[in-house]
Image (cartoon, coloured by chain):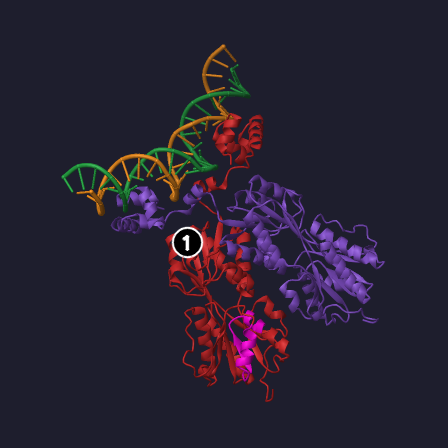
Chain colours: A red, B purple, C orange, D green
Amino acid sequence: MPTLADVGKAAGVSRGTVSNVFNRPELVRPELRERVEAAARALGFGGPDPKGRLLRDGKFNAIGFMPPGAYAISEVMRSPYGRELVLGVSLACDEAGTTLSLVNGTDNTRFASIRDALVDGFILGHSADIGLIISVQRRRLPFVILESDAGPDINSIKIDGRSGAVAAVRHLTGLGHRHFAILSVRRTPGPPIVHMPGQATRPLLAGFPLDDERLDGFKQGLAEANLSIDDVPIIETIPGEPSAGSVVFDRAPEATAILTMSDWQAITILDEAVRRGIDVPGHVSVVGFDGTAESARTTPPMTTVAQDVIGKGRLAARMVLDNEAPRQVVLPVELVVRASTAAPRTKTR
Amino acid sequence: MPTLADVGKAAGVSRGTVSNVFNRPELVRPELRERVEAAARALGFGGPDPKGRLLRDGKFNAIGFMPPGAYAISEVMRSPYGRELVLGVSLACDEAGTTLSLVNGTDNTRFASIRDALVDGFILGHSADIGLIISVQRRRLPFVILESDAGPDINSIKIDGRSGAVAAVRHLTGLGHRHFAILSVRRTPGPPIVHMPGQATRPLLAGFPLDDERLDGFKQGLAEANLSIDDVPIIETIPGEPSAGSVVFDRAPEATAILTMSDWQAITILDEAVRRGIDVPGHVSVVGFDGTAESARTTPPMTTVAQDVIGKGRLAARMVLDNEAPRQVVLPVELVVRASTAAPRTKTR
DNA sequence: ACCATTTTTTGGAGCGCTCCAAGAATTTTA
DNA sequence: TAAAATTCTTGGAGCGCTCCAAAAAATGGT
């Protein structure tokens, strides 16, 4: 690849003049400019290499998004929540004219990815791994972490997951439900894990504040109705697990209401219900979480704990772009009641 | 920001040793290593700056995605098609361990964006603008352009849009439809444009091969049934235009079948039908385009011209990553018949 | 024709790093 | 204990660019 200097030599001018031809052509005499351009063309020089400019100027003009947990960026793009989040981030990037880098880092390469990422700031998906935070801090880049409060010195944005979970349960107990099942998130690869009541290995502390908080909200909501979460089957599946619906219906047939951790999971259940001819909400009620656009268009339209995912992504991007004093933002949540919930079935099935 | 040299001075060692401490610690004697690490900590040095490494090594380890037309990246992320495309690209990026940079470029900044993008290759959304291709070629980066054939020397991937369009029309004429409306794409900002039959300003050549080809397919399909596209109302709306459904129902009430350019548009129509209590497919049939995941979950599930969007994105990424001899790929398309199409209503409304 | 201006062009400095051949220090071997 | 082998450390070179102060060239005025 030819460089500015090469072109300069070929055209009989200095490096600096060639740079000017490309960056401030008005500074150089037309005929000379032409000569330089001709030389550039002849050499196949395609303009100053951004690498050089970068080293000099120091700004990447990009922010990085690191998926939560050990997820790959394609997994983020697959989930309705992830897509809306990225949409929110991209909105802010559009406004700021910034590139959005979806940074890939599987397991052990995540740290190197952060170390090497060509970005001016980071948005970290929720994560159980404190190491990621340290990696970003090392680089002294502005960043924000999602769905985990990491203390007063660190930008964070989370929703009030507990209240949302409580609201979901209240809505259902208010409708008369007494028999629940919970579809929770498995954060390690593998098949669904079923925790039946009375079993030793009840989860409840997965290590992901996101999940724990919601589970705790469910527990609290149930307690308010004199129900114990210990009597509720909890099924953990990795996001997008297609068999999630099957497992829930097979292992918790007596449940009249199913609580989930995401719209995506709820969609899986709804899909399975259609497949099995199970009436929602006649036979069983289903509540989603997140309030993504998809939740409004399911069959039937879904009752869900809605948050402003797009707004969250956008705010996150703004926070790293603006780089002001660290804040801890807790976003509100709102139960949106649609048609996937109703009073419990009386008997039968 | 301290540099390797600063740390070296502080620790009484050379630049090179500090570099080794961070990149090949096994090469440096433990006690010295410790001393250097202490100095780094004291100075607040967070590891070698990627900018320097970049200049030396020359690889960005990222590929860029440039939205089609003059769209912003948030607009891509908003459309079902765009999201699946990006998902496909991210799949390949995951496999290759590459960062995916969503490059922002509004109108006149697009060229600068391409010039400055910190990427090793580009995926160009379909575009009417030859200038973008030239910009990328200038940088001698591998790239692929979507949905436009730019000649044998340029990587391109497109679907067989014409066949898809023909198949959609055949399906409908086979069902007995004679009265159509077409919902096409407006590629400039602004409200819907309605082209009624007999009007002077019929579109048909928008300058976007993508649209033109599909329109031409509709024309051909209609001709096969002795119908003329000149008798069909054509409505052009920008993607995501919420009033699209309204405009179609208001301006083409006699249509018994509506052809669209994307699932997104078809969804808009379906939503409006629900709002107005119009029966699909009893009163009017609707056909989408793209076969995104969303199309399977609409009410009613949508008949659509399906393509493998994810596969397309993935292939595109592979092509730039592999950087082999240029190919022009044409992907097949398949009409997926679901429940949004049926025989036309007999009379009434 | 000469000096004062104005317009163009120049090339050094510096951005921060990694590689690598060579030199220095240490350890091993005889 | 000296020579040989091994392990560590060093600093020059070079990656490609932009900025900028200064030099050179062109222009204008008298």
Percent position of residue A274, x then y? 63, 76
Residue that lies at the very extreme toward the right in this rendered image: B226
Position above or below: C9 against A256: above
Report x, y in % for residue A334.
Answer: 53, 72
Looking at the rendered structure, the number of numbered marks drawn on it comes to: 1
Residue at image point 60% right, 89% down = A348
Kindly tell me whether residue A290 is visible in this rendering: no
Residue occupying the point 85% across, 58% down: B226
Q: Magenta region: which residues?
A: A243-268
- Answer left or right for A176 relative to A109: right
State left or right for residue B258 relative to residue B295: right
Q: Residues within 10 Å of mark 1 (few under 14, many from 20)?
A: few
Instruction: Tell me, yes or no, whether the highlighted magenta stretch contains residue A250.
Output: yes
- The magenta stretch spans residue B14: no
| Of the pair B46 and B329, the residue shown nearer to us | B329
Q: Chain ID for label 1?
A: A
Which residue is disc 1 drawn over?
A112
Residue A130 seen from this side = yes
Q: Secondary structure at mark 1?
A: helix
Residue A187 position within the rendered picture, expressed as x and y whole percent measured from the top left = 46, 68
